[in-house]
Image (tube, rainbow, N blue to C red):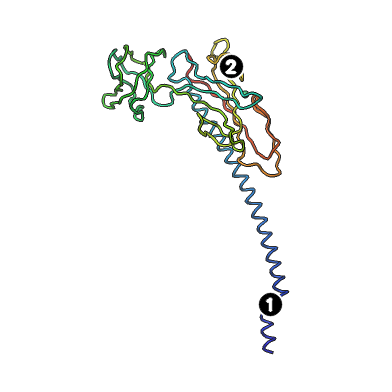
Amino acid sequence: MKKRTRREKGFTLVEILVALTILGLALAAISITFQSQSKSFSIQEQVSSMQIGGALALSRIAQEVRMAGYGVPAGTSPITGISDGAGGGPDSFTIVANLQASTFLSSDAAANANSVPVEDVTQFSNVSAGTELTILDPLRNLIETNSFASYDAGTSRITLQNNLSAQVPEGSYIGVSPENITYSIDSSDPNHPFLSRNGDVMAADIEDLQVAYGEDDNLDGLVDAWRNVPNNPGNILAVRISIVARSRYPEQGASYSLNGVENGRNFGPDGYRRRVYTTTVKLRNLLL
Ligand SMILES: [Ca+2]
């Protein structure tokens, strides 16, 4: 009788096997649900990161392109190095601009002086000694280039490393010499192309950059035609920039396609999601 009591309190092998099977099925069901939720979360995450990355890159590029030609002597094109991608490939272009410090002379500076009185000296608080400066007259003609030595917030003067070669009239511009900034697509890793700014990553997973240039053919101040290759870069009034952002990884079994923008190529069908972002930028600093 004792033996029987013990048996009634325990489980038979069959009972244990049935219980394990049920537990196994339940775990499998939970795991499938979890996997599918985690997959859809990962896709959502990828899509939102693609949207944020694409929009941010475009707003930053627009902010800089708007400054094209700033601090550049009259007669110098604000946009150079224009390349329309062959066979619908990505475009590239270069802007010339001072994106750093600049101000204007608050009164005349005499020839041979080694400092100039300026309106806003604080602009130069992060400029290091030896940085090249460009000095333009009020009509943006080049007076000279010089080098920054220091600034004095008390007297609101900038000290130069070399004496001025000529008199610089009040209202003249003084600023860090313009830099060239080139935007292009780097596809050296075909799985993760990126928007390149002078070779650095400006935004990851950007597959295409397409540009159209709004030109004022008859010089009346209005855009007459949009062209993928400008007739005369000096007549560009505005730039229409499009980028194609792509999800970081392809989705297995998915099939997406996208019509190219401007004269760019079509994409897919493949497992990547893509989205086009376009903005039109009016150049602020036109040639005089
Ligand atoms: Ca193109």
Where does ligand 1 appear, by image quarter? top right
Label 2 sits on residue: 230
Q: Which residue in the rendered view is the most extreme toward the left?
A: 154
Q: Residue at x 71, y 71 (%)?
A: 17
Q: Residue at x 65, y 41 (%)?
A: 250
- Asked if residue 18 is positioned above or below residue 98 in the image, the reply reads below
**Quadrant into which the N terminus falls:** bottom right
The image quadrant that residue 136 belongs to is top left
Callout 1: helix, strand or loop? loop
Q: Give x and y (percent) for residue 146.
A: 35, 19
Label 1 sits on residue: 11
Q: Which mark is residue 252?
A: none
Q: Give x and y (percent) for residue 30.
A: 66, 59
Callout 2 environment at 10 Å: few (<14), some (14 to 19), or many (20+)? some
Q: Earlier in the sequence, mark 2 or mark 1?
A: 1
Callout 2: helix, strand or loop? loop
Callout 1 environment at 10 Å: few (<14), some (14 to 19), or many (20+)? few
The image quadrant that residue 177 belongs to is top left
Q: Is residue 270 left or right of residue 209?
A: right
Q: CA distance from mark 2 to mark 1?
A: 85 Å
Disc 2 marks a residue whose amino acid type is Pro
Q: Give x and y (percent) for residue 225.
A: 61, 16
Q: Is residue 129 left or right of residue 67?
A: left
Q: Give x and y (percent) for residue 48.
A: 59, 41
